[in-house]
Protein backbone atom coordinates (compact mmCIF):
# COMPACT_ATOMS: atom_id res chain seq x y z
CA UNK A 1 0.00 0.00 0.00
CA UNK A 2 2.95 2.36 0.45
CA UNK A 3 3.26 4.92 -2.33
CA UNK A 4 6.83 5.48 -3.42
CA UNK A 5 8.33 8.50 -5.11
CA UNK A 6 6.52 11.13 -3.02
CA UNK A 7 7.78 12.52 0.25
CA UNK A 8 6.16 11.44 3.48
CA UNK A 9 4.29 14.22 5.25
CA UNK A 10 3.28 14.40 8.93
CA UNK A 11 0.56 16.79 10.10
CA UNK A 12 -0.82 17.26 13.57
CA UNK A 13 -4.22 17.88 15.05
CA UNK A 14 -6.36 17.00 18.04
CA UNK A 15 -7.24 13.45 18.97
CA UNK A 16 -11.04 13.28 19.09
CA UNK A 17 -11.45 9.49 19.22
CA UNK A 18 -8.45 7.27 20.07
CA UNK A 19 -7.15 4.56 17.78
CA UNK A 20 -4.96 3.87 14.76
CA UNK A 21 -6.26 3.58 11.19
CA UNK A 22 -4.29 2.65 8.08
CA UNK A 23 -5.79 2.80 4.60
CA UNK A 24 -6.59 4.80 1.50
CA UNK A 25 -7.65 8.43 1.73
CA UNK A 26 -11.03 9.59 0.51
CA UNK A 27 -11.33 13.39 0.27
CA UNK A 28 -14.92 14.46 0.77
CA UNK A 29 -15.50 17.74 -1.05
CA UNK A 30 -17.94 19.95 0.84
CA UNK A 31 -17.64 23.33 -0.81
CA UNK A 32 -18.84 26.53 0.83
CA UNK A 33 -21.95 28.11 -0.66
CA UNK A 34 -21.46 31.68 -1.80
CA UNK A 35 -24.51 33.78 -0.88
CA UNK A 36 -25.43 36.98 -2.72
CA UNK A 37 -27.86 39.57 -1.41
CA UNK A 38 -30.73 40.62 -3.60
CA UNK A 39 -33.86 42.59 -2.86
CA UNK A 40 -37.35 41.18 -3.28
CA UNK A 41 -40.65 42.96 -3.83
CA UNK A 42 -42.75 43.66 -0.74
CA UNK A 43 -45.52 41.62 -2.33
CA UNK A 44 -43.16 38.60 -2.44
CA UNK A 45 -42.03 38.77 1.20
CA UNK A 46 -44.56 36.25 2.51
CA UNK A 47 -43.74 33.89 -0.34
CA UNK A 48 -40.03 34.17 0.54
CA UNK A 49 -40.73 33.47 4.22
CA UNK A 50 -42.75 30.41 3.18
CA UNK A 51 -39.85 29.24 1.03
CA UNK A 52 -37.49 29.65 3.96
CA UNK A 53 -39.86 27.86 6.35
CA UNK A 54 -40.24 24.97 3.91
CA UNK A 55 -36.44 24.69 3.58
CA UNK A 56 -36.08 24.50 7.37
CA UNK A 57 -38.79 21.83 7.61
CA UNK A 58 -37.24 19.84 4.77
CA UNK A 59 -33.86 19.97 6.50
CA UNK A 60 -35.42 18.85 9.77
CA UNK A 61 -37.20 15.96 8.05
CA UNK A 62 -33.97 14.79 6.40
CA UNK A 63 -32.10 14.94 9.70
CA UNK A 64 -34.83 13.02 11.51
CA UNK A 65 -34.84 10.33 8.81
CA UNK A 66 -31.05 10.02 8.97
CA UNK A 67 -31.23 9.70 12.75
CA UNK A 68 -33.94 7.03 12.59
CA UNK A 69 -32.13 4.92 10.03
CA UNK A 70 -28.76 5.06 11.79
CA UNK A 71 -29.64 5.34 15.48
CA UNK A 72 -29.12 1.60 15.95
CA UNK A 73 -25.40 2.15 15.29
CA UNK A 74 -25.04 4.36 18.35
CA UNK A 75 -24.88 3.35 21.97
CA UNK A 76 -28.21 4.07 23.67
CA UNK A 77 -26.74 6.93 25.67
CA UNK A 78 -25.21 8.60 22.59
CA UNK A 79 -28.41 9.14 20.64
CA UNK A 80 -29.19 12.28 22.64
CA UNK A 81 -26.52 14.16 20.69
CA UNK A 82 -28.65 14.19 17.55
CA UNK A 83 -31.74 15.72 19.12
CA UNK A 84 -30.23 19.12 20.06
CA UNK A 85 -28.90 19.34 16.49
CA UNK A 86 -32.43 18.99 15.17
CA UNK A 87 -33.77 21.39 17.79
CA UNK A 88 -31.37 24.07 16.57
CA UNK A 89 -33.74 24.46 13.63
CA UNK A 90 -36.28 25.86 16.10
CA UNK A 91 -33.80 28.34 17.57
CA UNK A 92 -35.10 31.92 17.41
CA UNK A 93 -31.56 33.32 17.65
CA UNK A 94 -30.90 32.54 13.99
CA UNK A 95 -33.94 30.91 12.39
CA UNK A 96 -36.45 33.30 13.94
CA UNK A 97 -34.23 36.32 13.40
CA UNK A 98 -33.68 35.37 9.74
CA UNK A 99 -37.44 35.37 9.14
CA UNK A 100 -37.70 38.83 10.70
CA UNK A 101 -34.87 40.10 8.46
CA UNK A 102 -36.63 38.81 5.34
CA UNK A 103 -39.76 40.66 6.39
CA UNK A 104 -38.07 43.84 7.56
CA UNK A 105 -35.43 44.28 4.86
CA UNK A 106 -37.18 42.57 1.92
CA UNK A 107 -34.14 40.38 1.17
CA UNK A 108 -33.73 36.83 -0.06
CA UNK A 109 -33.82 34.01 2.48
CA UNK A 110 -30.24 32.85 1.78
CA UNK A 111 -28.83 36.28 2.60
CA UNK A 112 -30.99 36.71 5.70
CA UNK A 113 -29.90 33.31 7.06
CA UNK A 114 -26.21 33.88 6.39
CA UNK A 115 -26.21 37.44 7.72
CA UNK A 116 -28.04 36.48 10.92
CA UNK A 117 -25.78 33.51 11.55
CA UNK A 118 -22.63 35.60 10.93
CA UNK A 119 -23.70 38.08 13.61
CA UNK A 120 -24.24 35.36 16.21
CA UNK A 121 -21.02 33.63 15.15
CA UNK A 122 -18.94 36.81 15.55
CA UNK A 123 -20.19 37.17 19.12
CA UNK A 124 -19.52 33.54 20.03
CA UNK A 125 -16.02 33.49 18.53
CA UNK A 126 -14.91 36.05 21.09
CA UNK A 127 -15.53 33.53 23.87
CA UNK A 128 -12.55 31.29 22.98
CA UNK A 129 -13.81 28.46 25.12
CA UNK A 130 -13.27 25.19 23.19
CA UNK A 131 -16.50 23.66 24.46
CA UNK A 132 -18.69 26.51 23.24
CA UNK A 133 -16.79 26.97 20.00
CA UNK A 134 -17.59 23.32 19.27
CA UNK A 135 -21.28 24.04 19.93
CA UNK A 136 -21.08 26.97 17.51
CA UNK A 137 -19.56 24.65 14.93
CA UNK A 138 -22.51 22.29 15.37
CA UNK A 139 -24.83 25.21 14.65
CA UNK A 140 -22.86 26.13 11.52
CA UNK A 141 -23.24 22.61 10.13
CA UNK A 142 -27.01 22.74 10.63
CA UNK A 143 -27.26 26.16 8.99
CA UNK A 144 -25.28 24.85 5.99
CA UNK A 145 -27.82 22.05 5.57
CA UNK A 146 -30.63 24.59 5.34
CA UNK A 147 -28.58 26.60 2.87
CA UNK A 148 -28.17 23.54 0.65
CA UNK A 149 -31.94 23.13 0.47
CA UNK A 150 -32.50 26.82 -0.22
CA UNK A 151 -29.95 26.93 -3.04
CA UNK A 152 -30.75 23.51 -4.48
CA UNK A 153 -27.14 22.36 -4.11
CA UNK A 154 -26.20 18.87 -2.96
CA UNK A 155 -22.79 18.31 -1.44
CA UNK A 156 -20.97 15.04 -1.84
CA UNK A 157 -21.95 12.56 0.88
CA UNK A 158 -20.69 9.27 2.26
CA UNK A 159 -23.26 7.45 0.17
CA UNK A 160 -20.74 7.34 -2.68
CA UNK A 161 -18.16 5.48 -0.59
CA UNK A 162 -18.02 1.80 -1.54
CA UNK A 163 -14.70 0.51 -0.16
CA UNK A 164 -13.02 0.87 3.26
CA UNK A 165 -11.38 4.32 3.39
CA UNK A 166 -10.22 7.05 5.72
CA UNK A 167 -12.36 10.14 5.16
CA UNK A 168 -10.79 13.60 4.91
CA UNK A 169 -13.04 16.65 4.99
CA UNK A 170 -13.12 20.27 6.06
CA UNK A 171 -15.82 19.32 8.54
CA UNK A 172 -18.36 16.61 9.32
CA UNK A 173 -21.66 16.81 11.12
CA UNK A 174 -22.84 14.25 13.69
CA UNK A 175 -25.27 13.06 11.01
CA UNK A 176 -22.36 12.42 8.64
CA UNK A 177 -20.53 10.56 11.39
CA UNK A 178 -23.31 8.14 12.35
CA UNK A 179 -23.49 6.94 8.74
CA UNK A 180 -19.87 5.80 8.96
CA UNK A 181 -20.79 2.61 10.81
CA UNK A 182 -22.67 1.35 7.74
CA UNK A 183 -20.20 2.70 5.18
CA UNK A 184 -17.17 0.81 6.52
CA UNK A 185 -15.15 3.95 7.31
CA UNK A 186 -11.78 3.16 8.94
CA UNK A 187 -11.28 6.63 10.38
CA UNK A 188 -11.64 10.31 9.58
CA UNK A 189 -9.74 13.59 9.69
CA UNK A 190 -11.20 17.10 9.62
CA UNK A 191 -9.79 20.60 9.44
CA UNK A 192 -12.05 21.95 12.17
CA UNK A 193 -13.45 20.69 15.45
CA UNK A 194 -12.20 20.00 18.96
CA UNK A 195 -12.08 17.42 21.75
CA UNK A 196 -15.61 18.18 22.89
CA UNK A 197 -17.21 18.24 19.45
CA UNK A 198 -20.24 16.02 19.05
CA UNK A 199 -18.61 14.50 15.98
CA UNK A 200 -15.74 13.32 18.15
CA UNK A 201 -18.07 12.00 20.85
CA UNK A 202 -20.00 9.93 18.30
CA UNK A 203 -16.75 8.69 16.72
CA UNK A 204 -15.68 7.46 20.16
CA UNK A 205 -19.02 5.69 20.58
CA UNK A 206 -18.56 3.99 17.20
CA UNK A 207 -14.87 3.32 17.97
CA UNK A 208 -13.74 5.11 14.81
CA UNK A 209 -10.27 6.74 15.07
CA UNK A 210 -10.58 10.48 14.46
CA UNK A 211 -8.22 13.46 14.39
CA UNK A 212 -9.75 16.94 14.12
CA UNK A 213 -8.41 20.46 13.78
CA UNK A 214 -5.74 19.54 11.19
CA UNK A 215 -5.31 22.78 9.29
CA UNK A 216 -5.44 22.61 5.48
CA UNK A 217 -5.37 18.81 5.50
CA UNK A 218 -7.61 18.51 2.44
CA UNK A 219 -5.01 20.45 0.43
CA UNK A 220 -2.27 18.01 1.36
CA UNK A 221 -3.86 14.66 0.63
CA UNK A 222 -5.33 13.13 -2.53
CA UNK A 223 -8.02 10.48 -2.77
CA UNK A 224 -6.34 7.09 -3.08
CA UNK A 225 -3.13 7.97 -1.24
CA UNK A 226 -2.01 5.76 1.63
CA UNK A 227 -2.45 7.43 5.00
CA UNK A 228 -2.05 6.61 8.68
CA UNK A 229 -4.27 8.22 11.29
CA UNK A 230 -2.72 8.06 14.74
CA UNK A 231 -5.45 9.50 16.92
CA UNK A 232 -3.57 8.53 20.06
CA UNK A 233 -0.91 11.17 19.43
CA UNK A 234 -3.05 13.33 17.12
CA UNK A 235 -0.96 12.66 14.00
CA UNK A 236 -1.79 12.14 10.34
CA UNK A 237 0.91 10.60 8.16
CA UNK A 238 0.47 10.98 4.41
CA UNK A 239 2.38 8.63 2.09
CA UNK A 240 4.16 6.87 5.00
CA UNK A 241 7.59 5.34 4.55
CA UNK A 242 7.90 1.56 4.57
CA UNK A 243 9.41 1.74 8.05
CA UNK A 244 6.55 3.77 9.48
CA UNK A 245 3.99 1.67 7.68
CA UNK A 246 5.33 -1.49 9.31
CA UNK A 247 5.72 0.20 12.71
CA UNK A 248 2.14 1.42 12.73
CA UNK A 249 0.80 -1.93 11.60
CA UNK A 250 2.30 -3.41 14.77
CA UNK A 251 1.10 -0.51 16.93
CA UNK A 252 -2.41 -0.87 15.60
CA UNK A 253 -2.50 -4.57 16.46
CA UNK A 254 -1.16 -3.87 19.94
CA UNK A 255 -3.68 -1.09 20.49
CA UNK A 256 -6.61 -3.30 19.43
CA UNK A 257 -5.37 -6.07 21.74
CA UNK A 258 -5.06 -3.82 24.79
CA UNK A 259 -8.29 -1.97 24.04
CA UNK A 260 -10.16 -5.28 23.93
CA UNK A 261 -8.39 -6.35 27.11
CA UNK A 262 -9.55 -3.20 28.87
CA UNK A 263 -13.13 -3.91 27.84
CA UNK A 264 -13.05 -7.49 29.05
CA UNK A 265 -10.75 -7.40 32.08
CA UNK A 266 -10.04 -3.94 33.41
CA UNK A 267 -13.32 -2.05 33.73
CA UNK A 268 -14.59 -1.94 37.28
CA UNK A 269 -11.29 -2.79 38.97
CA UNK A 270 -10.28 -0.34 41.72
CA UNK A 271 -7.63 2.37 41.48
CA UNK A 272 -5.68 0.82 44.33
CA UNK A 273 -1.92 1.25 44.54
CA UNK A 274 0.54 -1.54 45.26
CA UNK A 275 0.86 -0.29 48.86
CA UNK A 276 -2.90 -0.33 49.42
CA UNK A 277 -3.95 3.31 48.86
CA UNK A 278 -7.20 3.57 46.92
CA UNK A 279 -8.28 6.73 45.10
CA UNK A 280 -11.91 7.08 44.07
CA UNK A 281 -12.29 7.76 40.34
CA UNK A 282 -15.40 9.63 39.27
CA UNK A 283 -16.87 10.87 36.02
CA UNK A 284 -17.17 14.29 34.42
CA UNK A 285 -20.47 14.49 32.55
CA UNK A 286 -22.33 17.03 30.44
CA UNK A 287 -25.81 15.57 30.86
CA UNK A 288 -27.76 12.85 32.62
CA UNK A 289 -27.27 10.58 29.62
CA UNK A 290 -23.49 10.60 30.13
CA UNK A 291 -23.83 9.22 33.67
CA UNK A 292 -24.60 5.70 32.44
CA UNK A 293 -21.44 5.72 30.32
CA UNK A 294 -19.35 6.80 33.32
CA UNK A 295 -20.84 4.07 35.50
CA UNK A 296 -20.20 1.46 32.81
CA UNK A 297 -16.54 2.55 32.78
CA UNK A 298 -16.23 2.05 36.54
CA UNK A 299 -16.96 5.54 37.92
CA UNK A 300 -17.62 5.65 41.67
CA UNK A 301 -19.92 8.60 41.28
CA UNK A 302 -19.97 11.89 39.37
CA UNK A 303 -17.37 14.44 40.42
CA UNK A 304 -18.51 17.11 37.98
CA UNK A 305 -21.99 17.41 36.53
CA UNK A 306 -21.91 20.33 34.09
CA UNK A 307 -25.34 21.91 34.17
CA UNK A 308 -24.69 24.26 31.24
CA UNK A 309 -26.32 21.96 28.67
CA UNK A 310 -29.73 22.89 30.10
CA UNK A 311 -29.08 26.55 29.28
CA UNK A 312 -27.23 26.20 25.97
CA UNK A 313 -29.65 23.74 24.35
CA UNK A 314 -32.61 26.00 24.97
CA UNK A 315 -34.06 29.19 23.55
CA UNK A 316 -34.84 30.58 27.03
CA UNK A 317 -33.78 30.05 30.62
CA UNK A 318 -34.85 26.56 31.77
CA UNK A 319 -37.53 26.63 34.43
CA UNK A 320 -37.01 25.33 37.94
CA UNK A 321 -39.10 22.25 37.13
CA UNK A 322 -37.20 21.52 33.92
CA UNK A 323 -33.95 21.57 35.86
CA UNK A 324 -35.42 19.58 38.75
CA UNK A 325 -36.38 16.67 36.50
CA UNK A 326 -32.84 16.50 35.04
CA UNK A 327 -31.12 16.69 38.43
CA UNK A 328 -33.55 14.15 39.90
CA UNK A 329 -32.75 11.79 37.04
CA UNK A 330 -29.04 12.31 37.74
CA UNK A 331 -29.48 11.53 41.44
CA UNK A 332 -31.43 8.36 40.71
CA UNK A 333 -29.07 7.17 37.96
CA UNK A 334 -25.87 7.58 39.99
CA UNK A 335 -27.31 6.00 43.16
CA UNK A 336 -25.97 4.70 45.53
CA UNK A 337 -23.02 7.00 44.72
CA UNK A 338 -23.18 10.77 44.68
CA UNK A 339 -23.16 13.45 41.98
CA UNK A 340 -21.56 16.88 42.38
CA UNK A 341 -23.64 19.41 40.45
CA UNK A 342 -21.77 22.55 39.48
CA UNK A 343 -23.95 25.62 39.32
CA UNK A 344 -24.05 27.54 36.05
CA UNK A 345 -20.48 28.10 34.86
CA UNK A 346 -21.01 30.45 31.95
CA UNK A 347 -21.71 34.11 31.41
CA UNK A 348 -24.34 35.94 29.42
CA UNK A 349 -21.95 35.98 26.46
CA UNK A 350 -22.51 32.22 26.09
CA UNK A 351 -26.30 32.44 26.27
CA UNK A 352 -27.00 34.38 23.06
CA UNK A 353 -30.68 34.99 23.68
CA UNK A 354 -29.94 36.66 27.04
CA UNK A 355 -26.83 38.57 26.06
CA UNK A 356 -26.90 42.29 25.39
CA UNK A 357 -23.40 43.63 26.17
CA UNK A 358 -19.98 42.77 24.79
CA UNK A 359 -17.11 42.14 27.19
CA UNK A 360 -13.56 42.70 25.96
CA UNK A 361 -12.29 39.72 27.98
CA UNK A 362 -15.15 37.35 28.94
CA UNK A 363 -12.77 34.88 30.64
CA UNK A 364 -12.10 37.55 33.26
CA UNK A 365 -15.58 39.02 33.20
CA UNK A 366 -19.11 38.38 34.42
CA UNK A 367 -19.19 34.59 34.36
CA UNK A 368 -19.93 31.62 36.61
CA UNK A 369 -20.76 32.61 40.21
CA UNK A 370 -20.38 36.29 39.32
CA UNK A 371 -23.06 35.97 36.66
CA UNK A 372 -25.34 34.04 39.00
CA UNK A 373 -25.03 36.55 41.83
CA UNK A 374 -25.80 39.35 39.35
CA UNK A 375 -28.77 37.40 37.95
CA UNK A 376 -30.21 36.21 41.21
CA UNK A 377 -33.39 34.61 39.88
CA UNK A 378 -31.39 32.37 37.52
CA UNK A 379 -29.33 31.23 40.52
CA UNK A 380 -32.37 30.78 42.78
CA UNK A 381 -34.20 28.63 40.23
CA UNK A 382 -31.17 26.39 39.80
CA UNK A 383 -30.42 25.99 43.51
CA UNK A 384 -34.07 25.25 44.30
CA UNK A 385 -34.08 22.58 41.58
CA UNK A 386 -30.89 21.00 42.92
CA UNK A 387 -32.16 20.98 46.49
CA UNK A 388 -35.48 19.41 45.49
CA UNK A 389 -33.61 16.72 43.53
CA UNK A 390 -31.39 15.97 46.54
CA UNK A 391 -34.35 14.21 48.15
CA UNK A 392 -34.02 11.43 45.54
CA UNK A 393 -30.33 10.62 45.88
CA UNK A 394 -26.93 11.87 46.95
CA UNK A 395 -26.23 15.29 45.47
CA UNK A 396 -23.63 17.92 46.32
CA UNK A 397 -23.67 21.57 45.23
CA UNK A 398 -20.51 23.20 43.90
CA UNK A 399 -19.94 26.89 43.11
CA UNK A 400 -17.57 27.70 40.19
CA UNK A 401 -14.99 30.48 39.93
CA UNK A 402 -15.10 31.63 43.55
CA UNK A 403 -12.43 34.28 43.98
CA UNK A 404 -13.30 35.84 47.35
CA UNK A 405 -14.93 34.88 50.64
CA UNK A 406 -17.60 37.53 50.06
CA UNK A 407 -18.87 35.69 46.96
CA UNK A 408 -18.98 32.42 48.86
CA UNK A 409 -20.93 33.95 51.74
CA UNK A 410 -23.43 35.61 49.40
CA UNK A 411 -24.02 32.32 47.61
CA UNK A 412 -24.46 30.48 50.90
CA UNK A 413 -26.87 33.14 52.19
CA UNK A 414 -29.06 32.62 49.12
CA UNK A 415 -28.82 28.86 49.61
CA UNK A 416 -29.86 29.14 53.28
CA UNK A 417 -32.84 31.32 52.42
CA UNK A 418 -33.98 28.85 49.77
CA UNK A 419 -33.68 25.99 52.27
CA UNK A 420 -35.90 27.88 54.72
CA UNK A 421 -38.50 28.56 52.04
CA UNK A 422 -38.57 24.92 50.95
CA UNK A 423 -39.08 23.88 54.58
CA UNK A 424 -42.02 26.32 54.88
CA UNK A 425 -43.48 24.93 51.65
CA UNK A 426 -43.12 21.35 52.96
CA UNK A 427 -40.95 20.44 49.99
CA UNK A 428 -38.48 17.70 50.97
CA UNK A 429 -34.74 18.04 50.38
CA UNK A 430 -31.51 16.79 51.90
CA UNK A 431 -30.97 19.04 54.90
CA UNK A 432 -27.37 17.78 55.19
CA UNK A 433 -26.47 18.48 51.57
CA UNK A 434 -22.76 19.13 51.08
CA UNK A 435 -21.69 22.46 49.61
CA UNK A 436 -18.31 23.06 48.01
CA UNK A 437 -16.40 25.37 45.72
CA UNK A 438 -14.13 25.14 42.71
CA UNK A 439 -10.53 26.23 43.19
CA UNK A 440 -9.65 27.57 39.76
CA UNK A 441 -8.75 31.18 40.51
CA UNK A 442 -5.31 31.90 42.03
CA UNK A 443 -6.85 33.98 44.83
CA UNK A 444 -8.91 30.99 45.98
CA UNK A 445 -5.84 28.78 45.93
CA UNK A 446 -3.68 31.18 47.91
CA UNK A 447 -6.29 32.04 50.55
CA UNK A 448 -8.02 28.66 50.88
CA UNK A 449 -7.71 28.73 54.68
CA UNK A 450 -10.12 31.70 54.75
CA UNK A 451 -12.73 29.77 52.78
CA UNK A 452 -12.42 26.61 54.89
CA UNK A 453 -15.02 27.45 57.58
CA UNK A 454 -17.78 27.87 55.00
CA UNK A 455 -17.40 24.81 52.77
CA UNK A 456 -17.68 21.03 53.00
CA UNK A 457 -15.30 20.20 50.13
CA UNK A 458 -13.19 21.72 47.37
CA UNK A 459 -12.61 20.64 43.79
CA UNK A 460 -9.57 21.88 41.91
CA UNK A 461 -10.34 22.81 38.31
CA UNK A 462 -6.86 22.44 36.84
CA UNK A 463 -7.82 23.68 33.35
CA UNK A 464 -8.66 27.24 34.39
CA UNK A 465 -6.24 27.34 37.33
CA UNK A 466 -3.30 26.67 34.99
CA UNK A 467 -4.62 29.20 32.50
CA UNK A 468 -4.92 31.93 35.12
CA UNK A 469 -1.63 31.09 36.85
CA UNK A 470 0.41 31.20 33.64
CA UNK A 471 -1.59 33.98 31.91
CA UNK A 472 -2.00 31.67 28.92
CA UNK A 473 -5.15 31.42 26.82
CA UNK A 474 -5.31 27.67 26.14
CA UNK A 475 -7.62 28.35 23.18
CA UNK A 476 -5.07 30.64 21.48
CA UNK A 477 -2.90 28.57 19.14
CA UNK A 478 -0.13 31.19 19.30
CA UNK A 479 0.52 30.58 23.01
CA UNK A 480 -1.16 27.21 23.60
CA UNK A 481 2.24 25.48 23.81
CA UNK A 482 2.95 27.56 26.93
CA UNK A 483 -0.03 25.98 28.70
CA UNK A 484 2.08 23.60 30.82
CA UNK A 485 0.72 21.48 33.71
CA UNK A 486 4.28 20.65 34.78
CA UNK A 487 5.32 24.28 35.21
CA UNK A 488 6.92 24.50 38.69
CA UNK A 489 4.48 27.24 39.71
CA UNK A 490 1.53 25.04 38.78
CA UNK A 491 2.87 22.05 40.70
CA UNK A 492 3.62 24.13 43.79
CA UNK A 493 0.16 25.71 43.72
CA UNK A 494 -1.57 22.35 43.39
CA UNK A 495 0.43 20.90 46.27
CA UNK A 496 -0.32 23.95 48.40
CA UNK A 497 -4.08 23.67 47.81
CA UNK A 498 -4.16 19.92 48.52
CA UNK A 499 -2.14 20.27 51.72
CA UNK A 500 -4.17 23.27 52.94
CA UNK A 501 -7.37 21.30 52.38
CA UNK A 502 -5.87 18.33 54.24
CA UNK A 503 -4.86 20.61 57.12
CA UNK A 504 -8.45 21.82 57.52
CA UNK A 505 -9.91 18.31 57.05
CA UNK A 506 -11.70 19.38 53.87
CA UNK A 507 -12.07 16.62 51.24
CA UNK A 508 -10.32 17.67 48.04
CA UNK A 509 -10.96 16.39 44.53
CA UNK A 510 -9.52 17.29 41.15
CA UNK A 511 -11.79 17.54 38.12
CA UNK A 512 -9.62 19.09 35.41
CA UNK A 513 -7.83 17.39 32.52
CA UNK A 514 -4.84 16.51 34.70
CA UNK A 515 -6.98 13.91 36.48
CA UNK A 516 -7.39 11.90 33.29
CA UNK A 517 -3.65 11.66 32.55
CA UNK A 518 -2.01 8.73 34.39
CA UNK A 519 1.27 10.51 35.19
CA UNK A 520 -0.41 13.77 36.24
CA UNK A 521 -2.88 11.79 38.36
CA UNK A 522 0.06 9.97 39.97
CA UNK A 523 1.62 13.32 40.94
CA UNK A 524 -1.65 14.62 42.36
CA UNK A 525 -1.89 11.51 44.54
CA UNK A 526 1.66 12.15 45.76
CA UNK A 527 0.88 15.73 46.80
CA UNK A 528 -1.39 14.74 49.69
CA UNK A 529 -4.67 13.10 50.55
CA UNK A 530 -6.87 13.38 47.45
CA UNK A 531 -10.44 12.14 48.00
CA UNK A 532 -11.16 11.56 44.33
CA UNK A 533 -10.16 12.30 40.78
CA UNK A 534 -12.88 13.11 38.27
CA UNK A 535 -12.46 12.63 34.51
CA UNK A 536 -14.07 11.75 31.20
CA UNK A 537 -15.51 8.25 31.34
CA UNK A 538 -13.15 6.43 28.97
CA UNK A 539 -10.08 7.49 30.98
CA UNK A 540 -11.28 5.84 34.19
CA UNK A 541 -10.16 2.21 33.61
CA UNK A 542 -6.80 3.34 32.24
CA UNK A 543 -5.95 5.61 35.18
CA UNK A 544 -7.12 2.85 37.52
CA UNK A 545 -4.81 0.33 35.89
CA UNK A 546 -1.85 2.71 36.07
CA UNK A 547 -2.47 3.23 39.80
CA UNK A 548 -2.42 -0.53 40.34
CA UNK A 549 1.14 -0.57 38.98
CA UNK A 550 2.57 2.12 41.28
CA UNK A 551 2.80 2.93 44.97
CA UNK A 552 1.56 6.00 46.85
CA UNK A 553 4.85 6.13 48.76
CA UNK A 554 6.82 6.40 45.52
CA UNK A 555 4.44 9.10 44.30
CA UNK A 556 5.15 11.19 47.40
CA UNK A 557 8.91 10.73 47.01
CA UNK A 558 8.74 11.64 43.31
CA UNK A 559 6.75 14.78 44.09
CA UNK A 560 9.35 15.80 46.67
CA UNK A 561 12.08 15.27 44.06
CA UNK A 562 10.49 17.24 41.20
CA UNK A 563 9.64 20.15 43.51
CA UNK A 564 13.39 20.81 43.61
CA UNK A 565 13.57 21.12 39.82
CA UNK A 566 13.06 24.49 38.14
CA UNK A 567 12.63 23.57 34.47
CA UNK A 568 9.79 21.72 32.77
CA UNK A 569 12.15 19.67 30.60
CA UNK A 570 13.99 18.38 33.68
CA UNK A 571 10.72 17.47 35.37
CA UNK A 572 9.56 15.56 32.28
CA UNK A 573 12.88 13.79 31.99
CA UNK A 574 12.69 12.68 35.62
CA UNK A 575 9.11 11.45 35.33
CA UNK A 576 9.68 9.54 32.11
CA UNK A 577 12.73 7.83 33.56
CA UNK A 578 10.73 6.72 36.61
CA UNK A 579 7.32 6.01 35.09
CA UNK A 580 7.55 5.21 31.37
CA UNK A 581 7.94 1.52 32.26
CA UNK A 582 4.30 1.60 33.42
CA UNK A 583 2.99 3.07 30.15
CA UNK A 584 1.76 0.69 27.48
CA UNK A 585 -0.58 0.66 24.51
CA UNK A 586 -3.91 1.85 25.85
CA UNK A 587 -2.35 3.77 28.76
CA UNK A 588 -1.16 7.08 27.36
CA UNK A 589 0.27 10.17 29.04
CA UNK A 590 0.70 13.67 27.68
CA UNK A 591 4.09 13.72 29.41
CA UNK A 592 5.32 11.10 26.96
CA UNK A 593 3.74 12.78 23.91
CA UNK A 594 5.67 15.63 22.26
CA UNK A 595 3.91 18.98 21.90
CA UNK A 596 2.24 19.20 18.44
CA UNK A 597 3.31 22.83 18.14
CA UNK A 598 6.95 21.73 18.10
CA UNK A 599 6.72 19.69 14.90
CA UNK A 600 6.74 16.02 13.96
CA UNK A 601 8.14 13.44 16.33
CA UNK A 602 8.67 10.71 13.71
Image (cartoon, rainbow, N blue to C red):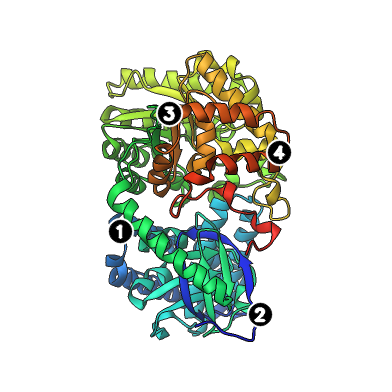
Query: Which of the marked residues, 4 or 1, is nearer the chain's N terminus?
Result: 1
Q: Where is residue 462 drawn, in percent x and y? A: 57, 37
Per the rendering, the mark at residue 506 is none
- Front of the two marks 2 and 4: 2
Residue located beneath label 2 in the image: 7
Per the rendering, the mark at residue 397 is 3
Residue located beneath label 4 in the image: 470
- Front of the two marks 3 and 1: 1
Q: Residue at x 53, y 14 (%)?
A: 503
Q: Residue at x 26, y 37 (%)?
A: 332
Asked if labels 2 and 1 touch by Cβ distance under 8 angstroms, the answer is no
Query: Which of the marked residues, 4 or 3, is nearer the chain's N terminus?
Result: 3
Q: For mark 1, does the 10 Å Cα neighbourhood hold few (<14), some (14 to 19), or many (20 or more) residues?
A: few
Residue 480 visible: yes
Is 196 above or below relative to 382? below
Q: Where is residue 83 drawn, in percent x and y? A: 37, 60
Residue located beneath label 1 in the image: 75
Is 556 above or below relative to 423? below
Asked if labels 4 and 2 touch by Cβ distance under 8 angstroms, the answer is no
Amino acid sequence: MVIRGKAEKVLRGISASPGIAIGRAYVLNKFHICVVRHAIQRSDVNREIDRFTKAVETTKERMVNTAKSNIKNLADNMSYILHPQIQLLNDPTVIGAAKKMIEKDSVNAEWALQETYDRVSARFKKIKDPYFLDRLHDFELVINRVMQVLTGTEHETLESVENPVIVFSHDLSPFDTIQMATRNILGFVTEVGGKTSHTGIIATSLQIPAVVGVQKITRNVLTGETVIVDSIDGKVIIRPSQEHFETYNKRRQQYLYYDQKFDSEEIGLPAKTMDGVEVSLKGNVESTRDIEVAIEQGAKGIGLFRSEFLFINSSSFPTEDQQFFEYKKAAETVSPNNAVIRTLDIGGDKIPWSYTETESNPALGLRAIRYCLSNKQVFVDQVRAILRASHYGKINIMYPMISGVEELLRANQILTKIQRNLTKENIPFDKDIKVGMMVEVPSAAIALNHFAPYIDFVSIGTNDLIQYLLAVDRGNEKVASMYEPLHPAVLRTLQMVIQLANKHDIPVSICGKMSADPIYAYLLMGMGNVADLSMEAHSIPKVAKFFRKVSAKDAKNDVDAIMKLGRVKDIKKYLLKKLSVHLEEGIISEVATPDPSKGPIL
